[in-house]
Image (tube, grey):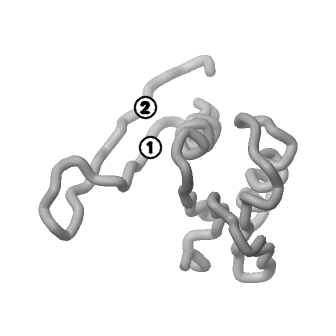
Amino acid sequence: MKNQNYKFTSYASASGKTDSDLRVILGPTNTGKTHLAMERMLGYSSGMIGLPLRLLAREVYDRLLRGDFGPVHSADVALITGEEKILPPKARYFVCTVEAMP
């Protein structure tokens, strides 16, 4: 990653906890935000990412299966968009378009 001008923001949960499980990564275009988010997500036992475009969600899903962000088995990854649903029975990681997030 060339530039690391990221702003990490945490949001308190409904219970008022400050150590929220929701993270938002903001930064300029082409700085590796998606790559960072995917690496971080794979560091947990499960996770979900909401992306603004169907083609971007598909690209990230394909890159996950290729191992671009780290090792992951195809049975662990789901893709959910308005047009496409690939839902393995025991998926742990979900790549979605924002409007299709469960």
Q: Which mark is residue 6?
A: 2
Q: Dot 1 corresponds to which residue?
A: 25
* Residue 57 located left or right of residue 98: right
SS class, disc 1: strand
The quadrant holding residue 89 is: bottom right
From the top left corner, tell me how far across and down residue 35 is, in percent: 64, 37
In the rendered view, would you say 28 is above or below 41? above
Number of on-image labels: 2
From the top left corner, tell me how far across and down residue 88 is, in percent: 77, 71
Q: Residue at x 86, y 43 (%)?
A: 66
SS class, disc 2: loop
Q: Which mark is residue 37?
A: none
For the residues labelled 1 and 2, the Cα–Cα distance comes to 6 Å
Mark 2, Cα crowd under 10 Å, few <14 / some 14-19 / many 20+, is: some
Outermost front residue: 90
Please tell me which of labels 1 and 2 falls first in the chain.
Answer: 2
In the rendered view, would you say 14 is above or below 75? below
Mark 1, Cα crowd under 10 Å, few <14 / some 14-19 / many 20+, is: few
What's the amino acid at mark 2? Tyr
Q: Residue at x 71, y 75 (%)?
A: 81
What's the amino acid at mark 1? Ile
Q: Residue at x 82, y 56 (%)?
A: 74
In the rendered view, would you say 27 is above or below 50? above
Task: Out of 36 and 42, give the one closest to the viewer.
Answer: 42
Task: Out of 32 and 37, give the one closest to the viewer.
Answer: 37
From the top left corner, tell me how far across and down residue 32 is, in percent: 61, 33
> Could you tell me if the residues under marks 1 and 2 are in contact, i.e. CB atoms within 8 Å?
yes
Image quadrant occupied by the C terminus: bottom right
Outermost top residue: 2
Image quadrant occupied by the N terminus: top right
From the top left corner, tell me how far across and down residue 99 is, in percent: 57, 78
Q: Residue at x 36, y 55 (%)?
A: 22
